[in-house]
Amino acid sequence: MGFRGFIVLVVLMGMRGGSTAAISLKDVSVHPIFVAASQKEDLTVEEGDGDVMATGELNPNHFPARRAAKVVQHYLNTRYGSPYRLFGLEEVLSATAEDVDDTGRRYHLQISAHEIISNRKQKCSAEVFFPRGEPTQPAEVKASCEELLQNTTAQEEALYQRYKGNHSLLSAQYIPDSQGNIEPDMMPFWHLSIAASSFIMLNESTENTLYNMAQVAQITQLETESDELKFDSLMLLHDMVSQEILHWKLLFTWSPAGGVKVQQMKQIPKPHH
């Protein structure tokens, strides 16, 4: 899908402290949203006409239920995600689907959501509505997982003060690197980037997509006179259905008081080598 214009959205953000050694995402316990989630997706196609979506009770392991549930994950990250709070999809417990006249298709889901950093899990009810027609409209989501929310105010303030007071602006590439490693100082920005990129994935998701975060190709802190930290970034997203790696330009700000504000998101052509 192409660029849908400018969008400003807000979500509270925070930080994560680190150890002294580089962290490898090959360790599933470190960040299952990157490794395990992509390995666990079951894209099995239900029997019958592939162009006709089933209604009624769905197999929770088949792609219609999994894709709708993935949209719930993106929604939770846009609402509550931060570098100290990040959500993954643990399991689809049950799912039903219904056609709503000619306006779209609604999914009713019971899922197990996983707050990755605290390693807490909760069963959640959710509803996802995919509108039909042109131009394509973003999915509408209703979900709540309050038991997974943790107070991250102190960590958020520490991250903000550290980088607001830096004389040299942050600049980094390839998070994680080609070996799946992330330096501890960069882990907060990996989490921050996933939360910010979730706005793209939520906005672009349809019944025929399944997005995961792949890599922060580049992130640069920009000078600003406001109280927020401002970042220019290039995010790589993986659509597991088409197996495409999509390049998105993302401009966003963050502060403990204001959360994340996505100022611009634009898909750019994949560079040719």
Image: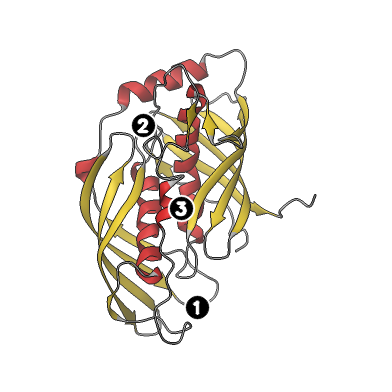
Look at the picture and state if 61 lies above or below 154. Answer: below
Gap between marks 3 and 1 measured at Cα: 30 Å
Label 1 packing within 10 angstroms: few (<14), some (14-19), many (20+): few
Between tags 2 and 1, which lies in front?
2
Residue 65 image point, x, y percent: 34, 68
| In front of the other: 4 or 125 | 125
Amino acid under disc 2: Tyr
Residue located at (40% from left, 47% from top): 78
Q: Nearer the viewer, mark 3 or mark 1?
A: 3
**Residue 15 as seen in the image, left or right of residue 111:** right
Q: Give the residue pinned by disc 1.
A: 133
Disc 3: which residue: 38
Mark 1: which secondary structure? Answer: loop
- The mark nearer the N terminus, 2 or 1, is 2
Contact (CB < 8 A) between labels 3 and 2?
no
Q: Would you place residue 66 above or below residue 89 in this image?
A: below
Say which residue appears at 41% left-offset and 59% top-offset: 41
Looking at the rendered structure, the kind of residue marked 1 is: Gly
Separation of disc 3 and disc 2 at Cα?
A: 21 Å
In the displayed structure, 248 sits above or below 98; it is above
Q: How is the image coloured?
A: secondary structure
Q: Name the foreground residue: 266 vs 86.
A: 86
Residue toward you, 97 or 168: 97
**Mark 3 crowdedness (10 Å alpha carbons): few <14, some 14-19, many ≥20:** some
Q: CA distance from mark 2 to mark 1?
A: 38 Å
Task: Indicate the amino acid at tag 3.
Answer: Ser
Could you say whether the residue bearing mark 2 is in a helix, strand or loop?
A: loop
Which residue bears the numbered disc 2?
A: 84
For the point 35% across and 82% down, the residue is 54
Residue 86 % position (x, y)? 36, 40
